[in-house]
Amino acid sequence: MVKISNLTKKFGSHVSLDNINCEFKKNDSIALMGANGAGKTTLIRSMLGYYHPDAGEVLIDGYNPITDRTKVLENISFVPQLPPPIKLSIDELINYISTSSGVDKDLILNYANEMQLDLKSNMSKSFFKLSGGMKQKLLIAISLAKKSDIIIYDEPTANLDPKARDDFYRLLKENEQNKVLLFVTHRLEEVQELVNRQIYMDLGKVVSDERV
Ligand SMILES: Nc1ncnc2c1ncn2[C@@H]1O[C@H](COP(=O)(O)OP(=O)(O)OP(=O)(O)O)[C@@H](O)[C@H]1O
């Protein structure tokens, strides 16, 4: 599903990704780890087409995230570490996602409910006025409802209370079949039960890639 070949990304003279070669296949559930500045976010952003590589390429289901960005994003869900500052109300946001990406609105509400997020009484509230954990829950609900083949979570549980973490893990377990799940994390223990592959990066390189 994801093929990364000889990928190099530089910012000025700094090499953030140094000739990365990696493949993520169906049913891979990966913990992507490494020290601050190792290149994890740069790798994800390259997969999402945010960055033009200096060398090499990423292919998502055969599509290039730079030249076929719309096609690539159709099949990827990404939940960032810091929720974006969306000014829309929850109602507007859900309607927008449902119209633009064909995501089933009721499914979003259903997953939000499973995450103990009461959307019904918050529909007119602005997204940015939700608490950090509530934003994260809504983005997780959307990521699951989108039914993408590739789901990327960047430190997804940072703002979640213990109960919400358990709900999140349960929902992921129910939904992980036939997908690529990629967790960027500094705490392996949090995703250990969900992953079957652990990748460590350092100084822009993959230094270890093990199936567990
Ligand atoms: N937009 C940018 N402009 C300049 N340098 C950048 C940019 N994005 C990343 N870098 C540099 O690339 C290197 C890798 O950064 P990256 O954000 O990918 O690390 P990371 O592994 O995600 O770190 P963290 O665990 O802190 O999130 C760092 O040295 C960083 O300063």
Image: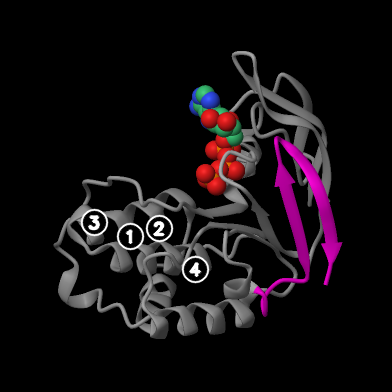
The residue that disc 4 covers is 145
Residue type, mark 2 in image: Ser
The residue that disc 1 covers is 94
Residue type, mark 1 in image: Ile
Q: Position of residue 17 (x, y in %)?
A: 71, 31
Can residue 67 be seen here? The reply is: yes
The span from disc 4 to disc 2 (Cα, nearest Å) is 10 Å
Whether the residues at callouts 2 and 1 have beta carbons within 8 Å, the answer is yes
Would you say residue 23 sits in the magenta stretch? Answer: no
Q: Say above or below: 113 vs 182.
A: below
Mark earlier in primary sequence (3, 2): 2
113 and 91: which is toward the camera: 113
166 left or right of 122? Answer: right
The residue that disc 2 covers is 98
The residue that disc 3 covers is 127
Q: Nearer the viewer, mark 3 or mark 2?
A: 3
Please tell me how crowded label 3 is: few (under 14), some (14-19), or many (20+) other residues with Cα within 10 Å: many
